Amino acid sequence: MIETHSLADKMFQFISEWHIKDNFNSDKLEGSLEDAIILLLRYNYELWHQEDIARDPKATDTEIARVKRNIDKLNQKRNDMIEKVDEKISDILSDKNIEVNKNATMNSETPGSIIDRLSINMLKIYHMKEQTQRTDVSQEHIESCRQKLNILEIQKKDLTVCLTELMNDLVHGAKYFKVYRQMKMYNDPNLNPVLYGKKKKER
């Protein structure tokens, strides 16, 4: 279903390729579970760089407003894709006719949530490695970043183990999960009071 042991390395490869030559094209994705994971990684990749821009002290108010809107849109897409990953996994488990054991317990964190955390972890690893390779900073800075990188590598292993164990439990019916709908309200013109309040005033 998912090659959990190699997933982080595949994510790192995509991140590295996008930084060298960004020719990503979502139209080439066919809707598989793997494609959904790639798209989730991509949204986090784009979020990362928008967040960098948002913290530029020289950015104008107009630029900050534009970036903030981009971040909101990307974060909505990211949350939607976490749900899509969980839906894909749930469908695969259903297609395999896997029966949930009588004593099975529900896992509050879904596979999609762990994969999301892993994708962010790999972005941190990529950029922290960059910091250890800089030639314009002090040795103290490099050493500090190396220590942080070691911690991030441990987190990568931990997340990979947790994802592997959860997927094994799901396949054997020892665990189950529910696809949690995020119910994000701020982008919905019918649920955000600022947005629907303006509609009332315009009438």
Image: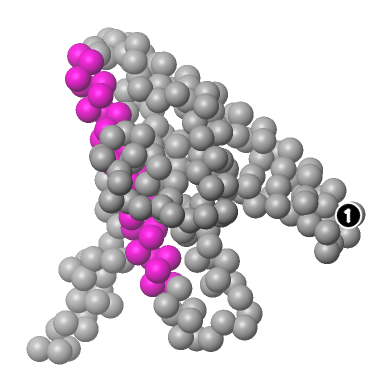
Q: Which residues are magenta?
A: 68-97
Q: Main secondary structure of the magenta part?
A: helix
Which quadrant of the structure image shows residue 34? top left
Asked if residue 57 is positioned above or below residue 135 in the image, the reply reads below
Magenta-colored stretch includes residue 31:
no
Q: Secondary structure at mark 1?
A: helix
Residue 148 in picture, x, y percent from top left: 74, 45
Instruction: Please indicate whether residue 150 sits to the left or right of residue 15 in the image.
Output: right
Instruction: Please indicate whether residue 79 sits to the left or right of residue 147 in the image.
Output: left
Asked if residue 202 is positioned above or below residue 54 in the image, the reply reads below
Q: Looking at the picture, which amino acid does disc 1 mark?
A: Glu
Asked if residue 196 is positioned above or below residue 42 in the image, the reply reads below
Asked if residue 181 is positioned above or below residue 157 in the image, the reply reads below
Q: Callout 1: few (<14), some (14-19), or many (20+) C-alpha neighbours within 10 Å?
A: few
Residue 200 in picture, x, y percent from top left: 14, 84
Instruction: Please indicate whether residue 106 sits to the left or right of residue 19 in the image.
Output: left
Residue in the picture at 21% in, 83% down:
198
Whether residue 156 can be seen here:
yes
